[in-house]
Amino acid sequence: MPGPITSAFLSLILLSVSLPALAQPGPPPLQALGEAPAPQENPITEPKRVLGKILFWDEQLSSDNTVACGTCHRPAAGGADPRRATHPGNDEIFGTADDIIGSFGIRALDSTGRQLNDPIFGHSPQVTGRAAPSFFTSMFADSNFWDGRATDEFVDPLNESNIVISTGGSLESQAVGPILSSVEMAQADRTWQDVINKLEQVVPLALASDIPADMADALQGGKDYGDLFLAAFSSAEINPTRIAMAIATYERTLVPNETPWDEFIEGDNSAMTAQQIEGWQLFNDSVCRNCHVPPLFSDNNFHNIGLRPANEDLGQFELTGQNNDRGKFKTPSLRNIGSKSALMHLGWISDVSDAFDFYNAGAADTGHTQFTQRQSNIPNSNIELNEVDVFANDDQQRNKIIDFIVNGLSDPRASQEVFPFDRPTLASESAQEPSVQYSNAIRTDLQTSSAQFELSVLGDSNRADTHFSLNEAITINARITIDPNDIGLESQLYCVVSYGGNLFALNEDGGFTLWNGDTASLTSARSIQRLGSIENIGLVSGLSQLSGVFEIYVGYMPNDNILRFNARPFSFEVE
């Protein structure tokens, strides 16, 4: 008979032999996307949700009443911005490869609210340096914004030593950022006290129309913001912490989790079409899934996919200071991405098909370029990002994946803007645009030029017209679309006003000096080292103190000493 040592040895052998045969735990079953978690410091309540919804859609939250949170984050646009605005990028020159499709913010304003002549955008609305990200599924992330600077820990904006939410507060952290941003919503040097004073005075949603029932009910009886904060927080005090908490609460109720894919995962085999089911299977077997992890269809992580060189926008590095984070940006969710017109942080990827072209650029000639320096590796894969080939040469299979992403991951409530994704109509959606006049170019050597000139004029209260009253505040801005043959040249910009039989030239100090009509003595309004595709000249921002008809010429002269200017004068009248 075996002894004790032998028995123990045999038992060990038998145990080791049987171990591989034991059932190994598999991955947890895939589940549909559930409801959003809420931090214990900010539980979801109905009065708080409605207050957040009203704040989110109130343009009065901005300094000049033109921008709400919802201006750049529309449910029907996948939680992002349907408008396409151009930022000239790192080189500040329009029409070059680093241009960005961003979002319109407010016109540049000084601390008194007076309009400034912005060196890039003139008197036009400023444009953000990144595309507006979707806020869909952001409630599941421990950091927000493209670079993750809105962190999980929410700190009282009025007291940095007071941690309001210790974990789970990235939505609150994000909500306070744009309100004081001088590009997005704020005049220069805006403070939280300025915001509070304004909310204490305005009528909620006074500028909006078509107000949904839940918002209208909350405002019934002429309730003001003090009443709404009282209902939500048991105190009428308005402060930035409560503003953030209300907006975040509203956002946590906007989970796009009623997609065909969610219904399919829950057992409804008819929720997706046969092609979408095939697309889901193909997606599931592709490297797309490594970053776009279901059910969020994002890993909420940061990667440099090589859209542009990392030094143009450092991304997450600005938060962490880690060199390997240069050019990294958050993986966006694919939910309702088919409704977006500006994908990724640069915005110039136009749709899902175009995104596939970008990822396949290393394997096929798709018209895109990947910048591989500091480009991230694909997580949990031995495939380099510039080696990706997702059916680059098989349109049939590729279209199945695209159908799944575009249609299988779309929540119709969001795309159709029905409750809880319903919203009011913003005043800016129907606002009168500036009176704009257009003209082709003429050259002093009588040759042709394809340059185009625009003049925009705004009066008091953003009234668009060409007839103004004495002492009315008017803003005039010229915009020049440069002849492609002239882009990149050193040049001078000019503006000449004809008034009362005399000519006056705009100088670099913003004043006008008498001009004798001789090109050689014409005063330059601004020097340009390198012409972009678009140049702006701020002409007037102030009171109209002279009556009569004003005719305006704008132009530019590269180093060939030939002036290009508007063939037809722009005119307006002060009476």
Image (spheres, helix red, strand yellow):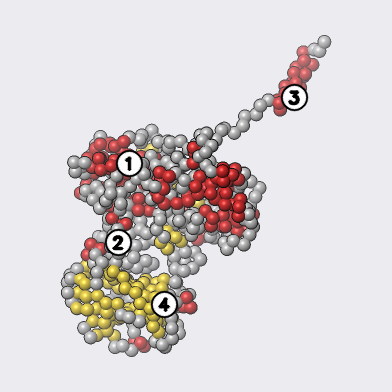
In this rendering, the label closer to the viewer, 4 or 2: 4
Task: Name the amino acid type tagged 3.
Answer: Val
Task: Name the amino acid type tagged 2.
Answer: Leu
Task: Name, please, the residue furthest toward the top.
Answer: 1
Note whether residue 115 is visible: yes
Viewer-nearest residue: 430 or 40: 430
| Count of numbered circles on the image | 4
The CA span between labels 3 and 1 is 59 Å
x then y, percent, for residue 450: 43, 78
Asked if 272 appears above or below 371 in the picture, the reply is above
x then y, percent, for residue 548: 19, 78
The residue positioned 26% from the left and 60% from the top of the image is: 113
The CA span between labels 4 and 2 is 29 Å
Residue underneath mark 1: 246
If the image is split into quadrants, where does the N terminus sit? top right
C-beta proximity under 8 Å, tags 4 and 3: no
x then y, percent, for residue 227: 22, 40
The CA span between labels 1 and 4 is 49 Å
> What kind of element bears circle 3?
helix
C-beta proximity under 8 Å, tags 1 and 2: no
Residue underneath mark 2: 109
The CA span between labels 2 and 3 is 76 Å
Q: Quadrant of residue 536?
A: bottom left
The CA span between labels 4 and 3 is 81 Å
In this rendering, the label closer to the viewer, 1 or 4: 4
Residue underneath mark 3: 17
The residue positioned 57% from the left and 52% from the top of the image is: 399
Task: Name the amino acid type tagged 4.
Answer: Ala
| Earlier sequence position, callout 3 versus callout 1 | 3
In this rendering, the label closer to the viewer, 1 or 2: 1
Residue underneath mark 4: 451
